[in-house]
Amino acid sequence: MLLYDGGRAPNPRRVRIFLAEKGIEVPMKSIDMTALGHRSEEITALNPLQRLPVLVLDDGTVLTETVAICRYFEELYPEPPLMGVDALDKATVEMWNRRAELNFSYFVAQAFRHTHPAMVEWEVPQIKEFGEANRPKALKAMEFLDEELKSREFIAGDRYTIADITAMMGVDMLKPARIERPVHLKNLMRWYEAVSLRPSASA
């Protein structure tokens, strides 16, 4: 088994944090994404979409997409549960992970990819107006999460899950996306401080 890792990029980090929470050690190969290593022949042969992370199993099977890789390890190592424990809990975690990804982190990522000079070679064409349009959407999403976090400790309920990992990546990306951190959203900031202090956050 070999995990092709992409360093500080959000999706590779999500998998590393997930593994750290479960105490799973997987052999990794670091790919320099700043040097466009994810577009190399080696990675393209494994994932024609040229994205990381990529997990190659012992039998040569290739898994891509962050949540799919996490799901594989969740099934093998169900404790501690990060993707739910029964039908309703699993559906709830999936719902909040999708919300954290598509209704928050996506907006932050697009603001970064379409406005940051370092992303010119990545996002072709880079449309600055589109990037700018995503900034207020990200703030609105954080206001929504702040309201939800009034009544519970974590994104999907009273237990840390993959939804917290996904949402934490969104907040971590605010600075490179040049979106001001909403310190006035006290519930969101309380949650963010708590999840950022978990040992896995440094994975």
Image (tube, grey):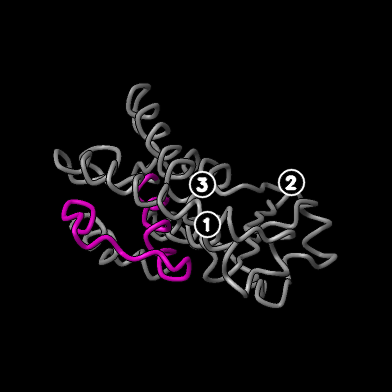
Residue placed under numbered mark 3 in the picture: 70
Residue designated by label 1 = 109
What residue do we see at 21% from left, 60% from top? 194
Type of residue at label 1? Ala
Task: Give left or right: position of 175 versus 75.
Answer: left
Decide which of 17, 61 is in the foreground and name it: 17
Mark toward the viewer: 3 or 1: 1
Q: On the rendered image, what quadrant is the N terminus found in?
A: bottom right
Write the start and end of the magenta stretch as one range: 163-189
Q: Quadrant of the C terminus?
A: bottom left
* Residue 86 included in the magenta stretch of the image: no
Q: Residue at x 37, y 43 (%)?
A: 82
Would you say 51 lies left or right of 198 here?
A: right
Marks 3/1: CA–CA distance: 20 Å
Q: Nearer the viewer, mark 2 or mark 1?
A: 1
Residue denoted by label 2? 61
User: Is 126 rendered above or below residue 149?
Assistant: below
Mark whose residue sits in front, 3 or 2: 3
Instruction: Indicate the amino acid at tag 3.
Output: Cys
Sort mark 1 into few (<14), some (14-19) or many (20+) by Cα contacts within 10 Å.
Answer: many
Query: Where residue 97 sits: x, y (%)?
Result: 42, 40
Q: Quadrant of residue 174?
A: bottom left
Distance CA(mark 2)–CA(mark 1): 29 Å
Residue drawn at the location 51% of the way across and 41% of the way down = 71
